[in-house]
Each structure stands twice: as structure tokens, then as C-alpha cells.
Amino acid sequence: MLRLLPGLLPALLPVLPAVFLTSFLPKAEAVAQPTSQPTSPPALSSTLSPTVWRPQQVRPLPGGLDRLLVVNDNNPELIIQPGILLSTFNGTGRLAGEAFQVPTAHLNLPLQGHFELFSHHVYAGRPEQLDSTLWLGVVAAPAGDRPVRLRLISGSTALSQSTDPSQPGAPFLPLPAVVAHDGSTAFSGPGSRVAAELLLNRRSPLFPSEWRLAADQLTTLVALPIPVKGLDPLLNGRNLQLRLESDGPVQIAT
């Protein structure tokens, strides 16, 4: 509009807002003028500490990974309904005369000798039932027609929140950067407690020292609750780790 009617601009100057005018009027451009003398960099402060070079060695940790089989059923972590987490059973076989309903849900991988089991799961409860409990079960059976002795070398389990003194708990608590650890007090989360007790080769009083697995029968090794009663929010988790040794081939499922 200002280009078509330039004569109106002087008359409108007293009433046009300053913001409106600045959007149309030409703007002055500042041009940097070169200085005659080059500028020198600012002097370093005398308070800065000098760089100190301290050589040190980086060495590899001793040992390495072994070929020990671990039954790890951590996926999915959040459990919302009953079902099989992980199974090494032969899905095309039979147990106690019964066929497996979903053969593809099993790995057909017998375990023998020394092996381990790791399980970690979270249960968020049911909104319509504030005192619901999810049960984590571990079952096993011989892979052949002979009974098997299954020995527990060490094992531990813990809840992230426990209101039952018989169920070990280890809530997530802030800890200092360095804390003395006696193996029974300094924990932050169930995984922290389980790992510490395994390093001490402990066996939880919730577990027997061994199981006798009868042929062609399913034996329950453990059945552990993950309760949410009295918790706000309705959320709880459990860690479980077992170091096992069998004198024959076994199949295991969670």
C-alpha cells in the first residue's frame, strides 16, 4: 500500500504505530570497519591450572566368557497374563501321556550338568483387583526315562517391594558413591541384592538344596509371588537367579 500511495506516508506518520513503520521503512545496515591494528588474544588468567600429563596402563580383565548355558526368560519383562515364558521341553514329545498344546512354544534343548537360570519380571496388577498377585513358577522334568537329581549350588530371589517378612525385598534406594558392603544390607533394587548374594554363594531359605525329578512327571521347583496388595502405584518386580547342576538331562520351563 505504501508503494502505491507514497504521498500518504507523511500524513500517516503521526498515527501509524512504530511496529508497523519499522516493517516497511528501510533499515540501516552497520558495516564493520577494519581496524588499523590487529587485535591480540586475551591473556590467560593466572588462576588456570597447567595441564598435567600422567601416564597410566590399561589392562584387560582376567578371565573371559564361558559356554555355560543360562535359561533367561526376561522377555517380556512386564507380565500381564498367564503363559509360558521360556521352555526347553520337546514340544513334539509327550509328558505324562499328554501332548503339548503349542509345540512351537518349546526349544527342545535338554540341559545337563552345570547350568543357570535368570528371571526378572514386573507385574502392574489389575485395576479392578487391588490385591492381585502374579505367581512366577519354574518347572522341570527329566528329558529321558530315568529320574534325575537336580542340585542347587546357590540361588537367590528378591522383590522390589515386600510387605511380607518371609519374602526378601530390596527397594530402589539412593546410595552414596562408596558404601561398605557386608553382603546383607547395602542394596538398591532386587537385582542388586540377588547379585550380591550369589557372589557370596548363598542359598535362599525359600529353596531346597536339591530336587528329585521323577521320570515322565512335571516337578515344580519354585512358585514365587509378585504381589501388589497395599502398593501405590500397583507395581512390583522380582529377580530370581539359580545355579544348578543335574546328573542327567533335564527340561525346564518358566
Image: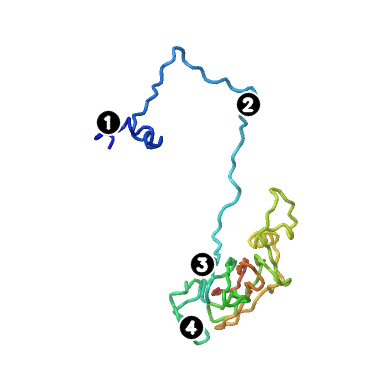
Q: Closer to us: mark 2 or mark 3? A: 2
* Secondary structure type for disc 4: strand
- Which residue matches tag 3? 76
**Which amino acid lies under the numbered mark 1 shown in the image of this protein?**
Gly
**Which amino acid lies under the numbered mark 4 shown in the image of this protein?**
Arg
**Which amino acid lies under the numbered mark 3 shown in the image of this protein?**
Pro
Q: Are marks 2 and 3 in contact (CB under 8 Å)?
A: no
Question: Residue 92's spot in the image, x, y percent?
Answer: 44, 79
Question: Who's the residue at 51% across and 17% down the image?
Answer: 40
Q: Is residue 187 above or below residue 80?
A: above
Question: Residue 119's spot in the image, x, y percent?
Answer: 58, 67
Q: Closer to us: mark 1 or mark 3? A: 1
State whether residue 210 appears in this view: yes
* Secondary structure type for disc 1: loop
Lower position in the chain sequence, tag 2 or tag 4: 2
- Which residue matches tag 2? 48
Mark 1 closeness class: few <14, some 14–19, many ≥20 residues within 10 Å: few
Q: Closer to us: mark 4 or mark 3? A: 3
- Which residue matches tag 4? 94
Query: Residue 238, located in which quarter of the rendered image?
Result: bottom right
Q: In which quadrant of the rendered image does the C terminus lie? A: bottom right
Residue 7 image label:
1
